[in-house]
Image: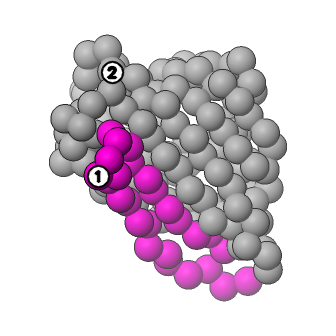
């Protein structure tokens, strides 16, 4: 099956401090979901290619938690959170904290929608504490990291 580079739509909700990211993949929901929950696969695509991803722990199940680092030379960026609900091939609800940004916590929901013909639409929403925090995410490289990560995920899913 040919793989096409898809566009990632990133939209800031004007009424609440929420970011919605939508992306289609040329792979079935089972494969796209597995790439989100298997740490051996996750390190191959999550975030910018210039960063090495190092997992401290990753227990992707309802009630589980995670912590990982993105390493760029001498710089390390830590992230951690908890998995509140994990439904195979359908849904992940988790918290997300960037350890370099104070005590802000994002509540994230990732939905894997089966489009048929071996394709999936992923819709990810991230609700943050304030409009200011949301806007800071959008101007501090988050968009580029998400788009580049999803391009890397395309390559992984095609292999």
Residue at x-position 69% and y-position 19%: 64
Q: x and y percent of residue 11 in the render? A: 35, 58
Question: Does the magenta portion include 8?
Answer: yes
Q: Position of residue 129 (x, y in %)?
A: 33, 27
Separation of disc 1 and disc 2 at Cα?
Answer: 20 Å
The image's mark for residue 104 is 2
Question: Residue 72 occupies which quadrant of the picture?
Answer: top left
Residue 91 part of the magenta segment: no
Which span is picked out in magenta?
Answer: 1-26
Quarter of the picture containing the N terminus is bottom right
Establish if 31 lies above or below 46. below
Task: Examine the rendering and report whether any part of residue 14 can be seen.
Answer: yes
Q: Earlier in the sequence, mark 1 or mark 2?
A: 1
- Residue underneath mark 1: 14
Q: Please tell me how crowded label 1 is: few (under 14), some (14-19), or many (20+) other residues with Cα within 10 Å.
A: few
The residue drawn where x is 42% and y is 29% is 106
């Amino acid at each position: 099956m040919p793989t096409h580079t898809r566009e990632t739509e990133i939209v800031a909700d004007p009424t609440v401090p929420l970011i919605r990211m939508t992306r289609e993949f040329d792979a079935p929901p089972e494969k796209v979901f597995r790439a989100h929950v298997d740490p051996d696969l996750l390190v191959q695509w999550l975030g910018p290619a210039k960063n090495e991803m190092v997992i401290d722990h990753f227990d992707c199940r309802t009630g589980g938690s995670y912590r990982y680092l993105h390493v760029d030379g001498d710089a390390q960026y830590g992230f951690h959170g908890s998995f509140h609900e994990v439904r195979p091939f359908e849904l992940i609800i988790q918290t997300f904290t960037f350890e370099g940004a104070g005590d802000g916590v994002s509540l994230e929901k990732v939905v894997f929608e089966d489009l048929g013909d071996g394709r999936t639409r992923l819709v990810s929403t991230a609700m943050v504490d304030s409009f200011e925090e949301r806007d800071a995410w959008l101007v501090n490289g988050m968009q580029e990291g998400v788009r580049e990560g999803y391009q890397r995920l395309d390559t992984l899913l095609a292999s």
